[in-house]
Image (spheres, grey):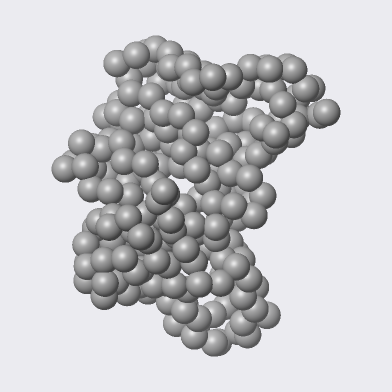
């Protein structure tokens, strides 16, 4: 029940396309859902996050869509660029408990 | 800017050696974490600490120990390194938000450890 399931494991998208990464969770007590972005040779860094009181959050080309009833959330990258090529981790946490990370998605944007 | 630094980017050790990985953060964060990252397995929490001299086991603590003598420093110790501990080790820190949750974790660049 503490797991966060992330798919796909890897994704290849043409430049200018939309990249979509999905995550699902079981624990309805989770109340914070961040996405982290990791470039090769670097540690992950917070990209965007959402709380379950809203269904969507947008920051530039990055959008989180949240479906509370389905216990799913997804990251959409619009107009994907080669510089977006990275590994993306979804995550979930509740209160002051530790963050649970998904297994990651390696995204490659073709130039 | 929050900075989390790790003592080494790359490390090669022999089986049975005692290994120390050091992590320092400069933002006065209460929380510090050690993860290991392996392909297909994502980030797995080894140990974390909410305060000086305090430590809690994560999901995979076996074969590891930690030390937090000062607020800014969190050390991961491999008592007797084994080949299955070859991995990328990531340190992170986050502020304490009074239990509200949602604290951003700030990661260091990682230490890639090879145990021969």
Q: Nearer the viewer, residue A63 or A1?
A: A63
Q: Is residue A25 left or right of residue B8?
A: left
How many numbered callouts?
0
At 73% from the left and 17% from the top, the residue drawn is: A17
x and y percent of residue A93 in the render?
33, 37
Q: Is residue B57 visible?
A: no
x and y percent of residue B24 in the render?
40, 66
Q: Is residue B112 left or right of residue B53?
A: right
Q: Is residue A45 above or below residue B50?
A: above
Q: Is residue B91 above or below residue A62?
A: below
Q: Nearer the viewer, residue A103 or A49?
A: A49
Q: Quadrant of the C terminus of chain B?
A: bottom right
At 77% from the left and 22% from the top, the residue drawn is: A15
Q: Is residue A94 visible?
A: yes
Q: Is residue A53 above or below residue B60?
A: above
Determine the residue located farthest toward the left in the rendered image: B98
At 42% from the left and 67% from the top, the residue drawn is: B23
x and y percent of residue B61 in the render?
40, 65
Corner quadrant of residue B99: top left
x and y percent of residue A49 in the render?
41, 28
Determine the residue located farthest toward the right in the rendered image: A111
At 46% from the left and 38% from the top, the residue drawn is: A46
């Amino acid at each position: 029940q503490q797991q966060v399931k992330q798919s796909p494991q890897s994704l290849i998208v043409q430049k200018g396309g939309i990249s979509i990464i999905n995550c699902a969770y079981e624990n309805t007590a989770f109340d914070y859902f961040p996405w982290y972005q990791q470039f090769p040779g670097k540690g992950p860094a917070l990209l965007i996050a959402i709380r379950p009181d809203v269904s969507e959050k947008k920051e530039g080309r990055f959008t989180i869509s949240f479906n509370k009833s389905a216990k799913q959330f997804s990251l959409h990258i619009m107009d994907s660029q080669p510089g977006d090529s990275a590994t993306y981790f979804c995550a979930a946490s509740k209160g002051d408990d530790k963050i649970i990370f998904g297994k990651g998605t390696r995204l490659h944007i073709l130039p | 800017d929050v900075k989390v630094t790790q003592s080494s980017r790359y490390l090669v050790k022999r089986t049975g050696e005692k290994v120390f990985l050091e992590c320092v953060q400069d933002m006065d964060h209460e929380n510090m974490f050690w993860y290991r990252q392996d392909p297909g397995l994502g980030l797995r929490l080894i140990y974390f600490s909410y305060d000086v001299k305090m430590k809690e086991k994560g999901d995979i603590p076996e074969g590891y120990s930690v030390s937090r003598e000062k607020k800014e420093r969190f050390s991961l110790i491999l008592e007797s390194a084994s080949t299955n501990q070859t991995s990328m080790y990531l340190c992170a820190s986050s502020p304490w938000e009074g239990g509200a949750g949602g604290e951003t974790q700030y990661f260091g660049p990682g230490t890639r450890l090879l145990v021969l």
